[in-house]
């Protein structure tokens, strides 16, 4: 598996996912502004990966902002980073985790290099804990799949969207190692093709059977290819289980319900936002019209045509069969069971 990011002490090196699969290129980020740019451009993407990148960005910001008022400066850096992409809760979570760590040790009297060391250690821990959580998630999810499973997925929720192993694809990876995977159908995921460019790339590189389909083929593929389940990732999950994920996920959930196919969401505990009662309060990022009007640099829509380009949609909890986390599998009633499980230790 390719490394999504590498921490170098004075820099965060990110894999530029906008150029995959044609070119493998890394970006050196020496300050939080370059990390913010990478997040906004989708050079680094996927909720867990964004959260870890944000934590490292906070450390880079702290290294350049050691004069007083130190904590106020960290708050400003966090606000700047969080503005890059509003939907993925992990972005704010990564920033807040570093701020909470800074407050704790600052109040204990740590300053300068000693404080920076604690912040760096916390960011590294976030990175390492994500990989461990993904592998636990994979084990819990694999247990849900039948033998010779045919799986459909959307966008990219693999190693490239995390610090390693993956969420939805982490389940696929774990199931494949158990000899359970017959085929994975990967939606291309318009308009930026994360499913075709990234998911199919990851699976093909590891020898996991994968078939690319266009987004509009998903429902028919579920029916004709006897798909056993749909597994997707998540960018934010409300307290009642409503889930924001890449645009097109809601379509899949509706089709899966009509065809009586289990629809699973795989996400770490950090993706839950218990401050939001339901999905109606989840902010939905809208991206540039050019993503729709152009394809591979070529104009494919009239200049005068209007564009609606939401990057995410929200799948109601009622359409979700189960939510797979590192702490276990959550089933309805979600409002009750999410709160109970997240309070338990992993």
Image (spheres, grey):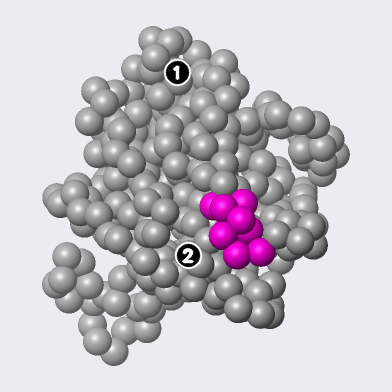
Residue for point 20% across, 54% down: 25
Which residues, given as a range, are shown in magenta? 111-120
Rendered view: 275 above or below 335: below
| Numbered tag placed on residue 175 in the rendering | 1
Q: Residue 57, position in %: x, y?
A: 49, 63
Mark 1 → mark 2, Cα distance in angstroms: 38 Å
Q: According to the image, label 2 marks what residue?
A: 60
Q: Is residue 181 left or right of residue 90?
A: left
Neighbour class for label 1 at 10 Å: few (<14), some, many (≥20)? Answer: many
Q: Residue 262, position in %: x, y?
A: 57, 29
Q: Secondary structure at mark 1?
A: helix
Residue for point 35% across, 78% down: 289
Please tell me whether the stretch drawn in magenta is mainly helix, strand or loop. Answer: helix
Rendered view: 95 above or below 304: above
Foreground pick, 229 / 13: 13
Neighbour class for label 2 at 10 Å: few (<14), some, many (≥20)? Answer: many
Q: Quadrant of the C terminus?
A: top right
Image-quadrant location for residue 160? top left
N-term mark: 1 or 2: 2
């Amino acid at each position: 598996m390719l490394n999504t990011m590498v921490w170098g002490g004075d820099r965060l090196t990110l894999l530029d996912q906008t150029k995959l699969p044609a070119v493998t290129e890394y970006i050196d980020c020496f300050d939080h502004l370059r990390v913010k740019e990478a997040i906004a451009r989708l050079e680094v993407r996927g909720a867990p990966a964004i959260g870890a990148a944000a934590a490292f960005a906070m450390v880079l910001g702290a290294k350049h902002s050691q004069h007083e008022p130190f904590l106020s400066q960290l708050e400003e850096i966090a606000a700047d980073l969080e503005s890059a992409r509003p939907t993925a809760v992990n972005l704010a979570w990564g920033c807040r985790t570093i701020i909470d760590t800074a407050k704790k040790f600052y109040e204990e009297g740590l300053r300068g290099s000693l404080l920076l060391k604690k912040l760096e250690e916390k960011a590294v821990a976030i990175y390492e804990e994500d990989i461990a959580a993904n592998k636990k998630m994979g084990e819990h999810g694999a247990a849900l799949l039948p033998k010779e499973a045919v799986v459909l997925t959307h966008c990219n929720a693999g190693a490239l969207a995390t610090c390693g192993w993956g969420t939805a694809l982490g389940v696929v990876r774990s199931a494949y190692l158990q000899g359970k995977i017959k085929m994975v159908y990967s939606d291309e995921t318009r308009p930026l093709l994360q499913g075709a460019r990234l998911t199919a790339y990851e699976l093909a590189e590891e020898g996991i059977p994968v078939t690319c389909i266009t987004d509009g083929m998903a429902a028919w593929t579920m029916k004709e290819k006897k798909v056993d389940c749909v597994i997707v990732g998540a960018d934010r999950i409300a307290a009642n289980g409503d889930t924001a994920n890449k645009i097109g996920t809601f379509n899949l959930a509706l089709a899966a319900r009509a065809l009586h196919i289990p629809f699973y969401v795989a996400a770490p505990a950090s993706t839950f936002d218990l401050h939001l009662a339901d999905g109606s309060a989840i902010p939905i990022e809208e991206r540039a019209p050019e993503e729709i009007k152009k394809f591979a640099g070529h104009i494919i829509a009239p200049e005068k045509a209007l564009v609606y380009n939401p990057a995410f949609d929200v799948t109601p909890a009622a359409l979700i069969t189960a939510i797979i986390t590192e702490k276990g599998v959550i089933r309805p009633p979600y409002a009750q069971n999410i709160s109970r499980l997240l309070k338990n230790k992993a």
